[in-house]
Amino acid sequence: MSLTADDRFAIADVVNGFAAAVDDIGNVEGVVALFAPDAVYDLAALGMGTIHGHKGIGDFFTTAFGGMAHNAHFMTNIVASATAGGARAQAYGHAFSLSKEGSMLEVKARYSFDLACTGEGWHITRLTMGLLIPLG
Amino acid sequence: MSLTADDRFAIADVVNGFAAAVDDIGNVEGVVALFAPDAVYDLAALGMGTIHGHKGIGDFFTTAFGGMAHNAHFMTNIVASATAGGARAQAYGHAFSLSKEGSMLEVKARYSFDLACTGEGWHITRLTMGLLIPLG
Amino acid sequence: MSLTADDRFAIADVVNGFAAAVDDIGNVEGVVALFAPDAVYDLAALGMGTIHGHKGIGDFFTTAFGGMAHNAHFMTNIVASATAGGARAQAYGHAFSLSKEGSMLEVKARYSFDLACTGEGWHITRLTMGLLIPLG
């Protein structure tokens, strides 16, 4: 099984759609809609545990958005490949988040998106985030 | 109507071609050639108004290039979709501009490219620029 | 001759694969495997000369990796076109390298990848690196 060019563009659109939703601060529904209902958002590498399902992911972003004023997630290095369950996309993210208190957080992250395609398009089944360079 | 994979690559090439032309300081003709003759370059969100047509865009870049020593526009998060008139591509740009006086401007921008395809390929009919994070 | 969408994705995978290998510090074999046996790695624009072949490239990265703790190469602006010998991909790289001594090097680079496709896929025959903005 291999991915078509259309699959690869659709998968890149999900990766970039995740950034767009996270950068549209407060758009919890937009973030959640990118995930499968039982998806896992794995932030263990950041010491923030593992978040489960639409409710868990929605609650997480509701809290996170609360402190944010502006975000910019520059997504790069997107490489997709077929898996038994659908596809995996590796990506880098150079992320900036300006808090309401005026402090800027800069993160150089590595993402791994597991995705499945249903009649409603590609959705994230597991998103794992790690750091390319430790926070300084 | 939907975009083919070839359309999507051609559109990404225009987005990246815009960065390449702007980073090739002084190449006003290269920038202008990416736009349709009656294109609009909308910088209203930056308080810089709206620029019209090849002559307006050429004059704008002639002036802007005058103060620049080196540019780097890292274009990311390119997502294209079909529109009634052709296509729209959303993109992020992490831009750096080093002035001749030695000051560095860093911009975290969001771009929206409206494009139309003629016998001579895809051209920009409207380019709107905004900021993901306010200038600091 | 023109590139298919599959070619373009395969070529982008090589560009991003180069970043992944360089960011996987110590993975000399992974870097070398992306190059054709007689490839040239041209760093003349950086005053670092021209490196030849698998052995030269492997030795170069063995030395370079020795001082590095963490790398992040954000690859953007990938534009590929067909050439007589295969393809050329232009790309930008926003690169960060944290040394073992704790100093951070940030580079805004321009890359040109010459590539050839054999029965074993696309490989780099020449990689030329330059700077978009001089090191500050």
Image: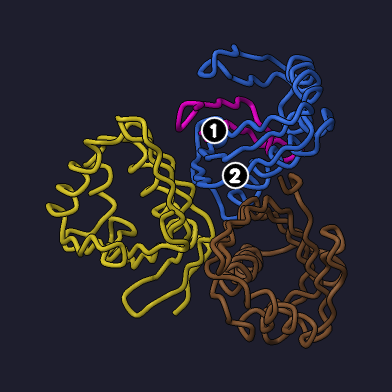
Chain colours: A blue, B brown, C yellow
Residue A94 on image: x %, y %? 57, 40
Q: Mark 2–mark 1 contact, CB under 8 Å?
A: yes
Q: Earlier in the sequence, mark 2 or mark 1?
A: 2
Residue drawn at (56%, 33%) of the image: A107
The residue nearer to you, when weighing B62 against B1, is B62
Q: Residue A116 magenta-drawn?
A: yes
Q: Are marks 2 and 1 on the same chain?
A: yes
The single residue placed furthest to the front in the displayed view is B101
Q: In which quarter of the image is residue B10?
A: bottom right
Bounds of the magenta span?
A108-136
Judge from the rendering whether residue A111 lies leftward or rightward of residue C53; answer left or right: right
Magenta stretch, main secondary structure class = strand
At a point 85% along the width and 58% down the height, the residue shown is B45
Q: Residue at x 68, y 82 (%)?
A: B62
Circle 1: element type: strand
**Residue type at mark 2?**
Met
Q: Measure how far apart labels 2 and 1 are at the Cα level.
A: 9 Å
* Residue drawn where x is 52% and y is 35% of the image: A108
Q: Mark 2 points at which residue?
A: A75
Please, is residue B62 above or below residue B132 in the view?
below
Query: Which of the numbered marks, if any, corresponds to residue C11?
Result: none
Helix, strand or loop at label 2? It is: strand
Which of the two residues, B28 or A34, is positioned nearer the viewer here?
B28
Residue C66, how many percent across, how many down?
21, 36
Q: Nearer the viewer, residue C94 or A89?
A: C94
**Chain of the residue under the numbered disc 1 shown in the image:** A
- Judging from the image, mark 2 belongs to the subunit labelled A
Residue B123 image point, x, y percent: 72, 77
Q: Quadrant of the N terminus of chain B?
A: bottom right
Which residue is tagged 1?
A111
Q: Does the magenta stretch include residue C51?
A: no
